[in-house]
Amino acid sequence: MKFTLRKKDLQTKARTGTLFTDHGEIQTPIFMPVGTAATVKAVHQRELKEDIKAQIILGNTYHLYLRPGLDILEKAGGLHKFNGWERPILTDSGGYQVFSLSGTRKIKEEGVTFKSHIDGSKHEFTPENVMDIQRTIGADIIMAFDECTPYPCEYGYARNSMEMTHRWLTRCIDRFDSTEGKYGYRQTFFPIVQGSVYKDLRKQSAEFIAAQGREGNAIGGLSVGEPAEMMYEMTELVTDILPADKPRYLMGVGTPANILECIALGVDMFDCVMPTRNARNGMLFTSEGIINIRNEKWKDDFSPIDPAIGNYASTFYSKAYLRHLTVSKEILAAQIASIHNLAFYLWLVGQAREHIQAGDFAVWKDQMVKKVSTRL
Ligand SMILES: CNc1nc2cc(C(=O)NN)ccc2[nH]1
């Protein structure tokens, strides 16, 4: 999978580039809407493409494996055919879900046994079968099976966890490199840096991951409860070590401010459930700041949600109308708010790309970080 760098910012480590996959190109920096179980919740594929202008979306191996299951996905010809999203897809390997979702997991050298959060049935994920599972789902970019080290944790636990993740990485690579895609298009594999919040472990993990020479590299184990400053410190340390000519993906990040700060630290790809999850709870991210649409103050504000970001839902519907739908728990509330928040995130990274190209990213970023964090 080819990645071409276009412009490097002079004052920060920000850069623009293009990622070429068999399902289309991705302009970076990019935000990837999370489509956990074959759907970006409350949003049509057409809206994702036309209104939100999403370029790549995520699927979760853990959820898709449990439901609809591999048999259905294979019969459909892979996830792209099953849900009709013909642009790029990235699947997380389940490492995070298995560690965060099912409380009944057991971690052993061989892999992780866990109980389904749906019906309590017992399952095992190993580096090998998670590669096979992601081959069957058919995502364009598939992630290593690792342990997303919990935060906080003792240094010894973080070191043992990182070392196991590195042993599992070797097994993932052996399996991935000895198997083929099932549907006639290429899939690429990203390893994941761990090491918790310990600088020496992060350095060691980043060096081990960089040494694998893969087509892209991910930074995991962050945005798991640590202070933002710590997340930035670890991200900066790791991006200084990961190769500059390969895309860098920071998993699970983050707020609009987090994303802008991490673009400045040299990160190219982001995913986060906040825009969709918070939308369903009435929390809107806008170009002027954060709105809790349930607040009384929006009751008779008939201005558009956010005309600046140029998509249908954010321009056509008023704050007052969306507040009414939200407090009434109307289904349309989740749809409008989800489309708006995702359109805002894609608009924001699009603006970042433009300012990196224009050479004024550093000043714009500092102004925008303040603006997007304002509580309205
Ligand atoms: C919301 N925060 C957040 N942190 C994540 C870390 C990982 C990871 O290390 N996977 N191997 C994945 C998803 C994440 N989401």
Image: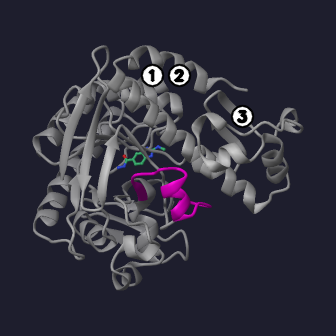
Density class for disc 2 (Cα within 10 Å; few <14, some 14-19, many ≥20) is many
Residue closer to the observer: 255 or 342: 342
What range of the chain is rendered magenta? 40-58
User: CA–CA distance between discs 2 and 1?
Assistant: 18 Å
| For residue 91, side relative to residue 169 (left or right) | right
Residue that carries the numbered disc 3 in the rendered image = 291
Which of the two labelled residues, at mark 2 and mark 1, occupies the earlier sequence position? 1
Q: Residue 16: within the magenta? A: no
- Position above or below: 321 against 364: below
Residue 274 seen by the camera:
no
Which of the two labelled residues, at mark 2 and mark 3, occupies the earlier sequence position? 3
Instruction: Name the amino acid, label 1.
Output: Glu
User: CA–CA distance between discs 2 and 3?
Assistant: 16 Å
The location of residue 145, given as percent across then percent down, is 29, 57
- Position above or below: 195 against 179: above
Residue closer to the observer: 110 or 93: 93
Residue that carries the numbered disc 2 in the rendered image = 368
The location of residue 345, given as percent across then percent down, is 52, 40
| Residue lying at 74% horizontally and 59% vertically, measured from the top left | 332
Residue 139 seen by the camera:
yes
For mark 3, give the secondary structure.
Answer: strand
Q: How many marks?
A: 3
For mark 1, give the secondary structure.
Answer: helix
Q: Which mark is residue 229?
A: 1
Q: Residue 56: within the magenta? A: yes
* Nearer the camera: disc 3 or disc 1: 3
* Nearer the camera: disc 2 or disc 1: 2
| Residue lying at 25% horizontally and 28% vertically, measured from the top left | 7
User: Are the residues at dot 3 and dot 1 in contact (C-beta closer than 8 Å)?
Assistant: no
Report which quarter residue 237 is drawn in. Answer: top left
